[in-house]
Image (cartoon, coloured by chain):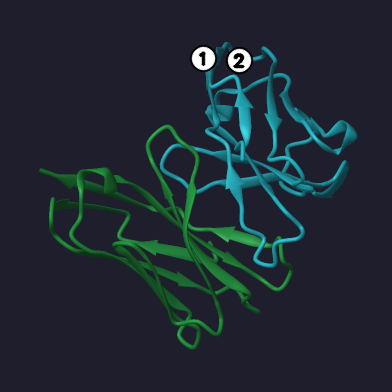
Chain colours: A green, B cyan
């Protein structure tokens, strides 16, 4: 079983709407959690990174939250744009700095 | 700052043929990773290098996959012979040991299609 589960698998929203993507993990001990955006045909690009002591981090219209007690994170996208259409991947790092577990991603489509 | 460079971007081969991918990490990044990303899935680590030494290759199918990082800079990933299930995007990433969070910087990927 994957130690990082993302939901939903895919999501379609209208331009201008908000949406929230979920990431649940079982990785323990926990070091940090990152959200990446991957445009079609491109490599993933980092959006946010949070350590266990942080519970929210913003990057423009992207806001990530973390609840280390329940081992859940969410990525909230405000006022979506067509360019937000991409896959969003949650990555959780364990005790070793380079021990990273990837989620399968959520495929977001923003329609005009 | 130049990003992670990968080539070729696309490659189509027939099963049982061989293929090689090249990666040039960000200058000064000691750690280099190769990931395999099958359509609709998250990246799966194949091999991790620290300078020119292998840190983790536990998920590398060593009967057909090989990778090297001579001189601790560029790296090549080879598949020989290729199978249909090797069709995927091969992502190279690098990180700096000086950066506490170990931020990963990915290349654009090399898309392999095995017919």
- Quarter of the image where one finds residue A97: bottom right
Query: Do the numbered discs 2 and 1 sit on residues whose CB atoms are within 8 Å?
Result: yes
Q: Secondary structure at mark 2?
A: loop
* Quadrant containing the N terminus of chain B in the rendered view: top right
State whether residue B10 is above or below residue B4.
above
Q: Secondary structure at mark 1?
A: loop
Give the residue at x 37% y 36%: A40
Front residue of A38/B97: it is: B97
Subunit of label 1? B
* Mark 2, residue position: B15
Instruction: Mark 2: give few (<14), some (14-19) or many (20+) Cα within 10 Å.
Output: some
Front residue of A16/B2: it is: B2
Across and down, in percent, residue B54 comes to 85, 46
Subunit of label 2? B
Q: Which mark is residue B104?
A: none
Q: Along the horizontal axis of the image, is B68 left or right of B44?
A: right
Q: Along the horizontal axis of the image, is B11 left or right of A70?
A: right
Across and down, in percent, residue B32 comes to 73, 44
* Mark 1, residue position: B115
Mark 2 and mark 1: span between their CA atoms? 6 Å
Q: Along the horizontal axis of the image, is A100 left or right of B41?
A: right
Give the residue at x 70% y 38%: B25
Return the residue found at the far front. B1
State whether residue A18 is above or below residue A107.
below
Across and down, in percent, residue B7 comes to 62, 22
Residue A1 visible in the displayed image: no
Upstream in the sequence, badge 2 or badge 1? 2
Give the residue at x 43% y 77%: A72
The reply to the same-chain question for discs 2 and 1 is yes
Residue B60 visible in the displayed image: yes
Give the residue at x 33% y 62%: A60
């Amino acid at each position: 079983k994957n130690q990082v589960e993302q939901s939903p698998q895919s999501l379609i929203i209208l331009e201008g709407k908000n949406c929230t993507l979920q990431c649940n993990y079982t990785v323990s001990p926990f070091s940090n959690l990152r959200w990446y955006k991957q445009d079609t045909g491109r490599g993933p690009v980092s959006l946010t990174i949070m350590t266990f002591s942080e519970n929210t981090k913003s990057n423009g219209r992207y806001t990530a939250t973390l609840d280390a007690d329940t081992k859940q994170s969410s990525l909230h996208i405000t006022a979506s744009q067509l360019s937000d259409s991409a896959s969003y991947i949650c990555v959780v790092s364990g005790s070793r700095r380079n021990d990273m577990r990837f989620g399968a991603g959520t495929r977001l489509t923003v329609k005009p | 700052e130049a990003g992670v460079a990968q080539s070729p971007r696309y490659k189509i081969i027939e099963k049982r043929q061989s293929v090689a991918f090249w990666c040039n990490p960000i200058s000064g990044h000691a750690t280099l990773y190769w990931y395999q990303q099958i359509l609709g899935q998250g990246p799966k680590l194949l091999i991790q290098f620290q300078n020119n030494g292998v840190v983790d290759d536990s998920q590398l199918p060593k009967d057909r996959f090989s990778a090297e990082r001579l001189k601790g800079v560029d790296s090549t990933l080879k598949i020989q012979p290729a199978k249909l299930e090797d069709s995927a995007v091969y992502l190279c990433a690098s990180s700096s040991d000086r950066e506490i969070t170990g931020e990963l910087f990915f290349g654009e990927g090399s898309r392999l299609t095995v017919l």
